């Protein structure tokens, strides 16, 4: 079970009752929390109603990690090629048994036992998505959120999203994203 001191607003968790991944949008002092700004209609949840999400490479990609464009799936550190050389989150090497990654200058590794960060002179095992989010925030001060894929569907503002315009951030010249419900909105 997740301990309450492990959670922050914005952490992703799983709701076994609906088999849905969601982000925490509110936590109160009594141990209740809300997810996805309660747009999934579950009301208040207790810690016993949620479970952690195992950290996988797919979650790293969802958080914006750039994968190398090398044809060979095995490559040494410094040999990776990227489409976006300015991305601060990338996979930096891959062997048959492990891989290395970099986020904003902080290196971490993955092997068959999970993901590892070297902090001071100790290796710290990171098993779950919320732990990874919290560690990245502690090390860099940056929040990790899922990036929108090219397959996200744009909706008209009046049709689906009922939040004020100031709740939106610009994605590109034609699209905005609602910070509350994460809907992609066609300008």
Image (cartoon, helix red, strand yellow):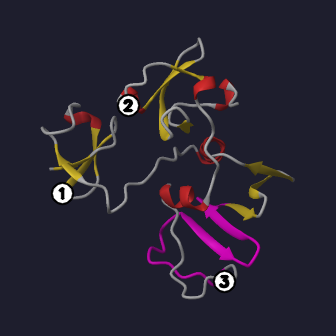
Q: Secondary structure at mark 2?
A: loop
The residue to which callout 3 is attached is: 75
Is 65 left, or right, of 53 in this rendering?
A: left
The spot of residue 169 in percent (x, y) is 29, 45
Q: Nearer the viewer, residue 142 or 133?
A: 133
Residue range highlighted in magenta: 78-106
Query: Could you give the CA–CA distance between mark 1 and mark 2, rounded to whole angstroms?
Result: 27 Å
Q: Please tell me which residue is depicted at 20% across the width and 36% down the height of the picture.
A: 165
Q: Nearer the viewer, residue 49 or 12?
A: 49
Q: Secondary structure at mark 1?
A: loop
43 up-or-down from 146: above or below: above
84 up-or-down from 75: above or below: above
Q: Is residue 155 magenta?
A: no
Q: Residue furthest left?
A: 158
For marks 2 and 3, the one nearer the N-term is 2
Q: Residue furthest bottom?
A: 71
CB-based contact (under 8 Å), mark 2 and mark 3:
no
159 up-or-down from 95: above or below: above
């Amino acid at each position: 079970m997740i301990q309450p001191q492990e959670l922050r607003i914005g952490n992703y968790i799983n709701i076994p009752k609906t088999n849905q991944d969601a982000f925490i949008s509110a936590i109160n002092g009594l141990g209740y929390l809300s997810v996805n700004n309660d747009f999934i209609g579950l009301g208040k949840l207790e810690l016993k109603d949620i479970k952690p999400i195992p950290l996988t490479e797919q979650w790293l990609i969802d958080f914006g990690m750039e994968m190398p464009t090398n044809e060979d799936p095995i490559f040494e550190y410094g040999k990776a090629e990227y489409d976006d050389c300015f991305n601060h989150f990338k996979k930096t090497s891959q062997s048959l048994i492990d891989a290395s990654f970099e986020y904003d200058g902080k290196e971490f590794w993955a092997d068959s036992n999970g993901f590892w960060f070297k902090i001071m002179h100790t290796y710290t095992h990171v098993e779950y998505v919320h732990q990874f989010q919290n560690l990245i925030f502690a090390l860099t001060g940056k929040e990790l959120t899922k990036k929108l894929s090219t397959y996200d569907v744009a909706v008209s503002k009046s049709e689906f999203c009922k939040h004020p315009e100031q709740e939106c951030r610009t994605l590109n010249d034609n699209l905005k994203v609602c910070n509350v419900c994460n809907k992609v909105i066609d300008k």
